Image: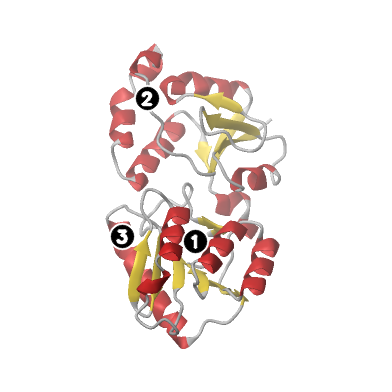
Amino acid sequence: MSRTAIIAGQGALAPAIAARLEDPVVAALEGFAPSIPHENFRLERLVPFFDWLAERGVDRVTFAGAVRRPRLDPEAFDPRTASLVPRILTAMQSGDDAALREVIALFEEAGFTVAGTEEIAPDLVPGEGILVGEPTAADIADTDRAAKIVEGLGALDLGQGAVVAQGLCLAVETLPGTGAMLDFVAAHRDMRPRPNGPRGVFWKAPKPGQDRRIDLPAIGPETVDQVARAGLAGIAWQAGGVILLEREVAVERARDAGVFLWAR
């Protein structure tokens, strides 16, 4: 019997993926427990983990949820995984995209197919359209500017998001993530040149050339709440390139907060 393993991180994505699969195997890096039943594994014992997956009939894996880079214990490596140490260490010291490409390569070399969220749950990745609200001409201009900024960041293997208001970049997403960026914008609402002018837009998109099977950007109801607290007009994202979690709840909260949602 063919089975899919979810390499689960924190957040709502892993439970959403699990609900769409029949009898999935759920595993998580030790220290990054998702909110669903799972087995822990350590990067220092990656090859025995591959064996464990194969013993359970797994031939496909998918990655779902947020995970930070773990701290490695040199004494914890088993002999077979020790042969991968140079590759693992190089990946850990690389940018996010380069590191994740190496992770995919390791799983594929072990005989597993790696599937993205788009393949398993295409309904979570909205196509083009405005879900709620209506961006103004100023909002569209701010979105254009933010999209160019994120494209530039992607070339440097940095973040997947930016906030632009009145043509000015208020913040970009870096290692602390989307939440930290939007908290920063909320704490500095007075940075807009015209206090009563256009409120600004949060833009989200994959990095140019990113392997979309892993680390696809995601937004959800909490993102809507943070955007509202930051005083922004809306959220725009690359259509077909961003996961929208709990869509109905996110749309309802956006409508209540007067925030537009636009897959561009």
Q: In front: mark 1 or mark 2?
A: 2
Query: Of all residues shown, which one is farthest toward the bottom?
Result: 137
* Closer to us: 200 or 144: 200
81 or 114: nearer the eye?
81
Quadrant housing residue 152: bottom left
Report the residue marked by disc 2. Answer: 72
Q: Amino acid at mark 3?
A: Leu
**Element at badge 1?**
loop
Between the C-alphas of marks 2 and 3, the distance is 28 Å
Residue 153's disc is 3
Residue density around tag 2, few if under 14, some if 14–19, many if 20 or more, within 10 Å = some
Q: Is residue 48 left or right of residue 208?
A: right
SS for callout 3: helix
Q: Would you call the spot at circle 3 few (<14 residues within 10 Å), some (14-19), or many (20 or more)?
A: many
Q: Which residue is mark 1?
A: 241
With respect to residue 219, does 191 lie above or below? Answer: below
Which of the two marks, 3 or 1, is nearer to us in this view?
3
The residue under label 1 is which amino acid type?
Gly
- Looking at the image, residue 164 sits to the left or right of residue 239; the answer is left
The residue carrying pointer 1 sits among few (fewer than 14), some (14 to 19) or many (20 or more) residues within 10 Å by Cα, namely many
Circle nearer the N terminus (1, 2)? 2
Looking at the rendered structure, the number of numbered marks drawn on it comes to 3
Answer with mark 2 or mark 3, whichever residue precedes in sequence. Answer: 2
Give the quadrant of the N terminus: top right
At label 2, the amino acid type is: Leu
